[in-house]
Image: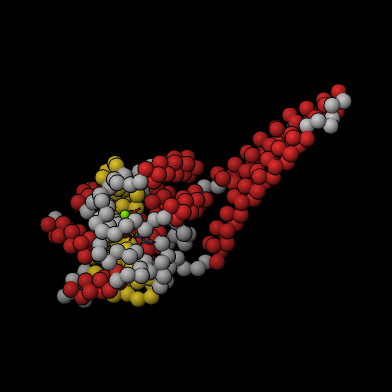
Amino acid sequence: MLSVIIPAYNEEKCIRPAYERIQSLLNENNIECEFIFIDDGSTDETYKVICELSKEKNNITGLHFSRNFGKESAISAGLQAVSGSCAVVLDCDLQHPPEKIIEMYQLWEQGYEIVEGIKSSRGQEKMVYTAGAKFFYSVISRMAGFDMANSSDFKLLDRKVVDVLNNMPERGFFRAISYWVGYNKATVEYDVAERVDGVSKWSTTGLIKYAFSNITSYSTAPMQTVTVLGFVMLVISVIFGVWALIDKIVGRALEGMTTVIIITIFIGSIIMISLGIMGYYIARIYEEIKGRPKFIISSTVKSKKE
Ligand code: UDP
Ligand code: MG
């Protein structure tokens, strides 16, 4: 059985179309399936729609979060509820074309344990997003040591992989962790479709925060740049030191106040940036060490099996 995991945040209008489209597609291909909808603390009628749907159909599980915990948490919750022998994660807005699930499923049947959806185009996104995403992925790919361009959360995972992910205590980044675990991988390319309804839940500041927290959770490179900056400053200070000594010897010592000011503020800002980077890691350690749950499920619905 295939478990379809769908995180949903304020998607009241998307739940039904998503269910119907995916269900009929899987029916045509004789793939048995269950649906796991995770309502990520929506403020609209999303959970109500999920509850109604679970009464009408016989293969739906709905989880309702006590508040909005974010898509990563929603995916974690979904993975923990999987009872199939493989699971696919896709967006509620059908931007991940459901037709590709069939292709992914066939690859899984051939023995691949992770089938990655790779974006071949990014669809209709704002220019800044495309540029932002490009920059983000080139930075994170370099820092984390694997190519992450065009990757997405659209993936099909074997039961084994789901179990491994469920046993990882850390707050991961779904699309990266599935690279980290290894396994036999295949990829399927897809074009990002238009949203069925509603608007994207990402704000620009949200995306920046997301980028930052993900870079720091997969790489310590920013901390190492602090050391590099330290060495750069050392070289600069040697040069200026020699220069200052020469000035002193030649008797021009009083000039150069501007240089002193520039150096002081430059060093000051480098130190502050460095402290900020360190602080970021400390904050992450603190977050992890508190060991709070990734999400809180406040209610669950399950369709009755016939
Ligand atoms: N989503 C979620 N929690 C959030 C934000 C988004 O579960 O806090 C879900 C959302 O309902 C959708 C998917 O994540 O199914 C992708 O969100 P969205 O379409 O807003 O992002 P985009 O496609 O613009 O990256
Ligand atoms: Mg979307």
3 lies left or right of 306: right
- At horizontal 33% and vertical 68% (from top left) the residue drawn is 39
- At horizontal 64% and vertical 50% (from top left) the residue drawn is 275
User: Within the image, what quadrant is residue 306 found in?
Assistant: bottom left
- At horizontal 41% and vertical 70% (from top left) the residue drawn is 67
Is residue 45 visible to us here?
Answer: yes
User: Within the image, what quadrant is residue 289 found in?
Assistant: bottom right
Q: Residue furthest left?
A: 28
Position of residue 255 relative to residue 80, above or below, is above
Nearer-the-camera pick, 123 or 72: 123
The image shows residue 85 at horizontal and vertical percentages of 27, 60
Position of residue 2 relative to residue 225, above or below, is below
The image shows residue 304 at horizontal and vertical percentages of 21, 76
Is residue 160 visible to us here?
Answer: no
The image shows residue 45 at horizontal and vertical percentages of 29, 71
Ligand 2 sits in which quadrant? Answer: bottom left
The image shows residue 80 at horizontal and vertical percentages of 36, 65
Nearer-the-camera pick, 132 or 92: 132
User: Within the image, what quadrant is residue 195 found in?
Assistant: bottom left
143 lies left or right of 228: left
